[in-house]
Image (cartoon, rainbow, N blue to C red):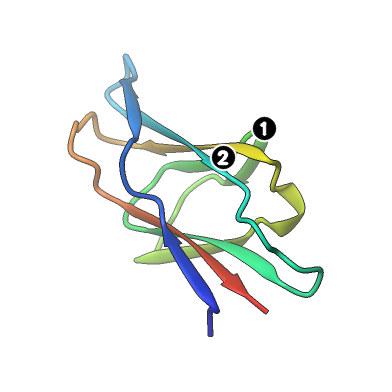
Amino acid sequence: MPLHIIRLRDPWQYKPFPSGGMRWSRAFHRPTGLTANETVWLVVSGPAAAVWLGEQRLTASVDGPESRFDITAWLADHNRLIIEVPRADEKRSFDVSLEICG
Protein backbone atom coordinates (compact mmCIF):
# COMPACT_ATOMS: atom_id res chain seq x y z
CA MET A 1 0.00 0.00 0.00
CA PRO A 2 1.44 3.39 -0.98
CA LEU A 3 2.50 5.82 1.72
CA HIS A 4 1.99 8.77 -0.58
CA ILE A 5 0.47 9.33 -4.05
CA ILE A 6 1.48 12.23 -6.30
CA ARG A 7 -0.77 12.75 -9.32
CA LEU A 8 1.05 14.19 -12.35
CA ARG A 9 -1.69 16.42 -13.72
CA ASP A 10 -1.18 19.50 -15.85
CA PRO A 11 0.95 21.03 -17.24
CA TRP A 12 1.56 18.45 -19.98
CA GLN A 13 3.01 19.47 -23.33
CA TYR A 14 2.12 17.63 -26.51
CA LYS A 15 3.37 17.34 -30.05
CA PRO A 16 1.69 15.41 -32.89
CA PHE A 17 3.59 12.89 -34.99
CA PRO A 18 3.31 12.95 -38.79
CA SER A 19 2.13 9.32 -38.55
CA GLY A 20 -0.88 10.35 -36.49
CA GLY A 21 0.25 9.68 -32.92
CA MET A 22 0.91 12.15 -30.12
CA ARG A 23 3.91 12.62 -27.82
CA TRP A 24 3.07 13.96 -24.37
CA SER A 25 5.77 15.20 -21.98
CA ARG A 26 5.89 16.59 -18.49
CA ALA A 27 8.67 17.63 -16.14
CA PHE A 28 8.66 16.77 -12.44
CA HIS A 29 11.07 16.86 -9.52
CA ARG A 30 12.31 13.97 -7.42
CA PRO A 31 9.99 13.64 -4.41
CA THR A 32 11.62 15.05 -1.29
CA GLY A 33 12.33 13.08 1.85
CA LEU A 34 12.80 9.69 0.22
CA THR A 35 14.58 7.16 2.38
CA ALA A 36 16.74 4.22 1.27
CA ASN A 37 13.95 1.72 1.99
CA GLU A 38 11.27 3.52 -0.05
CA THR A 39 10.34 2.68 -3.63
CA VAL A 40 8.85 5.09 -6.17
CA TRP A 41 6.43 3.57 -8.66
CA LEU A 42 5.28 5.29 -11.85
CA VAL A 43 1.69 4.28 -12.53
CA VAL A 44 0.19 4.87 -16.00
CA SER A 45 -3.55 4.33 -16.40
CA GLY A 46 -4.88 4.28 -19.95
CA PRO A 47 -3.49 3.55 -23.40
CA ALA A 48 0.10 4.40 -24.25
CA ALA A 49 2.36 3.28 -27.08
CA ALA A 50 5.62 3.96 -25.21
CA VAL A 51 6.72 5.33 -21.83
CA TRP A 52 10.09 7.02 -21.21
CA LEU A 53 11.67 8.52 -18.10
CA GLY A 54 14.44 10.73 -19.40
CA GLU A 55 16.58 8.52 -21.64
CA GLN A 56 15.26 5.30 -20.06
CA ARG A 57 12.56 3.54 -22.07
CA LEU A 58 10.26 1.83 -19.58
CA THR A 59 7.98 0.01 -22.02
CA ALA A 60 7.07 -0.27 -25.66
CA SER A 61 3.35 -0.34 -24.82
CA VAL A 62 0.85 -0.26 -21.99
CA ASP A 63 -1.41 -3.21 -22.66
CA GLY A 64 -3.81 -3.30 -19.73
CA PRO A 65 -5.80 -0.66 -17.90
CA GLU A 66 -2.78 0.15 -15.70
CA SER A 67 0.98 -0.35 -15.81
CA ARG A 68 3.44 0.10 -12.95
CA PHE A 69 7.18 0.77 -13.17
CA ASP A 70 9.72 0.88 -10.35
CA ILE A 71 11.57 4.11 -11.24
CA THR A 72 13.49 4.55 -7.98
CA ALA A 73 16.92 3.89 -9.53
CA TRP A 74 16.33 6.29 -12.44
CA LEU A 75 15.01 9.30 -10.55
CA ALA A 76 17.07 12.46 -10.88
CA ASP A 77 16.51 15.81 -9.18
CA HIS A 78 14.79 17.00 -12.39
CA ASN A 79 12.95 14.44 -14.56
CA ARG A 80 11.12 14.40 -17.89
CA LEU A 81 8.39 11.86 -18.51
CA ILE A 82 7.40 11.12 -22.12
CA ILE A 83 4.34 9.13 -23.10
CA GLU A 84 3.52 8.35 -26.71
CA VAL A 85 -0.03 7.48 -27.70
CA PRO A 86 -1.18 6.06 -31.03
CA ARG A 87 -3.80 8.75 -31.72
CA ALA A 88 -3.30 12.47 -32.32
CA ASP A 89 -5.85 13.65 -29.77
CA GLU A 90 -5.29 16.89 -27.87
CA LYS A 91 -7.27 15.50 -24.94
CA ARG A 92 -5.01 13.39 -22.75
CA SER A 93 -6.34 9.80 -22.63
CA PHE A 94 -4.21 8.58 -19.71
CA ASP A 95 -3.51 9.40 -16.06
CA VAL A 96 -0.13 9.25 -14.36
CA SER A 97 0.85 9.14 -10.70
CA LEU A 98 3.87 8.45 -8.54
CA GLU A 99 3.33 6.06 -5.64
CA ILE A 100 5.85 6.10 -2.81
CA CYS A 101 5.95 2.81 -0.91
CA GLY A 102 8.13 1.86 2.02
Q: Give the residue at mark 1.
A: 55
Q: Secondary structure at mark 2?
A: strand
Residue at the (34%, 66%) spot, across then down: 65
Residue pictured at 33% horizontal, 21% vertical = 15
Indicate the position of residue 27 as horizontal and vertical percent values: 49, 35
Query: What's the amino acid at mark 2?
Result: Trp
Left or right of 5 on screen, residue 9: left
Q: Are marks 1 and 2 in contact (CB under 8 Å)?
A: yes
Q: Which residue occupies the extreme bottom position in the image?
A: 1
Q: Is residue 40 left or right of residue 19?
A: right
Picture quadrant where residue 23 is located = top left
Q: Nearer the viewer, residue 92 or 1?
A: 1
Residue 70 placement (x, y as % from top left): 65, 62
Please give the residue where the numbered disc 2 appears in the rendered image: 52
> In which quadrant will I find the C terminus?
bottom right
Relative to residue 12, is residue 98 drawn left or right? right
